[in-house]
Amino acid sequence: MTNLLAVLMPTPQGGSSGALAFGLQMVAIIAIFYFLIIAPQRKAQKKHQQTLAGIKKGDEVMTEGGIIGQVIFVQDDRLTIRTAENTRIVVARAKINRVLNVEGSTPEGK
């Protein structure tokens, strides 16, 4: 059995070829992680930042906590939103999860 394994798994002739193969495998793994995980995550984060920067008065937004309201006042890092009960809430701009009435599309669920 060990003779069969020795034939099927040749040993590297030089010490550098094993290191080269390992190095190529590591580069391939890093490239796979980058293209499957890191790049899409950065793209989504950039899109979310652009959405937050584009919020204006009159937009309907949803916070990370699930509160839905209409933006009635915009500051640099804060938004004042009015909820259905005519309650005004000041929310950090970074805590906005999504804008519901993006032009050219309908709110999700409708």
Image (cartoon, rainbow, N blue to C red):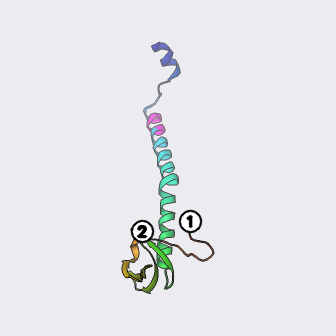
Residue 21 coordinates in the image, percent (x, y): 48, 37
Residue 34 coordinates in the image, percent (x, y): 49, 54
Label 1 residue SS: loop
Label 2 residue SS: loop
Residue 88 coordinates in the image, percent (x, y): 38, 83
Number of on-image labels: 2
Judging depth in this view, the residue of 84 and 1 nearest the camera is 84
Q: Image quadrant for the C terminus?
A: bottom right
- Residue 27 vs 73, above or below: the answer is above
- Please give the label number shown on residue 35: none
Q: Residue at x 49, y 83 (%)?
A: 56
Query: Which amino acid lies under the numbered mark 1 shown in the image of this protein?
Result: Gly
- Residue 92 vs 12, above or below: the answer is below
Label the magenta part by its dominant secondary structure: helix
Q: CA distance from mark 2 to mark 1?
A: 14 Å
User: Is 20 contained in the magenta span?
Assistant: yes
Q: What residue range appears in magenta?
A: 16-21
The residue pinned by badge 2 equals 66
Judging depth in this view, the residue of 103 and 30 nearest the camera is 103
Query: Which amino acid lies under the numbered mark 2 shown in the image of this protein?
Result: Gly
Q: Quadrant of the rendered structure where residue 82 is?
A: bottom left
The residue pinned by badge 1 equals 109
Q: Residue at x 55, y 76 (%)?
A: 101
Q: For mark 1, does the 10 Å Cα neighbourhood hold few (<14), some (14 to 19), or many (20 or more) residues?
A: few
User: Is 98 contained in the magenta span?
Assistant: no
Q: Give whichever of discs 2 and 1 has the lower sequence position.
A: 2
Would residue 47 be found to the left or right of residue 76 on screen? Answer: right
Q: Residue at x 47, y 25 (%)?
A: 11
